[in-house]
Image (cartoon, rainbow, N blue to C red):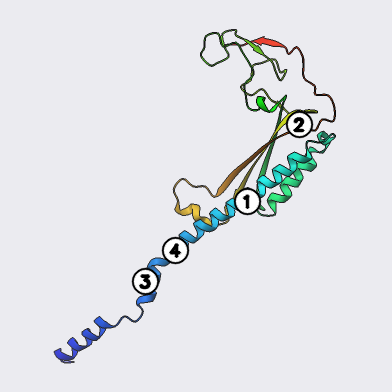
Amino acid sequence: MTRRAIIAQLSRLKSDDTGATIVEFALVSPVLMLLLMGLFDLAYNMYTNEMLNGAVQQAARNATVEGAAGRQQEIDAGVTRAIRAVAPGATMTFNRRFYAGFSDVNRPEDWDDIDGNGTCDNGELFEDANGNGIWDANAGADGIGGARDAVLYSVTIDYPRMFPVYSFLPGQSNTFSLTANTVLRNQPFGAQQVSQNPTTGNCTA
């Protein structure tokens, strides 16, 4: 092949863009796939979160009626079924705490903070709202309480991610965790059991 023919061949190759689209797609596709998996993972988690909140709200309403104390497992099972319909491998953790009123939810038991350090210590007097004999940073008691009590119902789920996007993001796990909380007052099916003279105690250091 002459030098002129070689130059002509190289010129044709230089101007030939056949297959360029395939090369460009090969460069872009990994980023595109990662973006799509991230969007699908986000949408899946958002949908699961909506299902969890809806199931918790329904379960909490079912627990406010008289006789619900004997149906807690049945009520929790309803939440489990709703969640496992969208997240089959989910593990569930249920928690209930009841309070005399909404204003008491997640609040500490009252105490005389004599030294002003924000901690119940050094023999300071406290009001034992839940009757367990010690000062608590959360005044609630485990269970669903009785008539007119405010109940904090909390459910935490852990489930495997549907898409392996976590493999490409540092610090991410192959499981995802969600928590839903709701507070409802039990129906007035009886007199509220509120101690008129709650016991008191002394905080230890």
Label 3 or label 2, whichever lies nearer to me, is 2
Q: Earlier in the sequence, mark 4 or mark 2?
A: 4
Q: Residue at x 49, y 52 (%)?
A: 166
Q: Which residue is mark 2?
A: 144
Q: Residue at x 46, y 59 (%)?
A: 35
Q: Residue at x 54, y 50 (%)?
A: 174
The kind of residue on which mark 1 rests is Thr
Q: Which residue is mark 3?
A: 24
Q: Secondary structure at mark 4?
A: helix
Whether residue 126 is situated above or below residue 156 in the rendered picture = above
The kind of residue on which mark 4 rests is Leu
Q: Earlier in the sequence, mark 1 or mark 4?
A: 4
Using a 10 Å C-alpha cutoff, classify the residue at mark 4 as few (fewer than 14 neighbours), some (14 to 19) or many (20 or more). few
Label 1 or label 3, whichever lies nearer to me, is 1
Question: What's the CA distance linking mark 3 and mark 2?
Answer: 61 Å
In the image: residue 1, left or right of residue 19: left
Using a 10 Å C-alpha cutoff, classify the residue at mark 2 as few (fewer than 14 neighbours), some (14 to 19) or many (20 or more). many
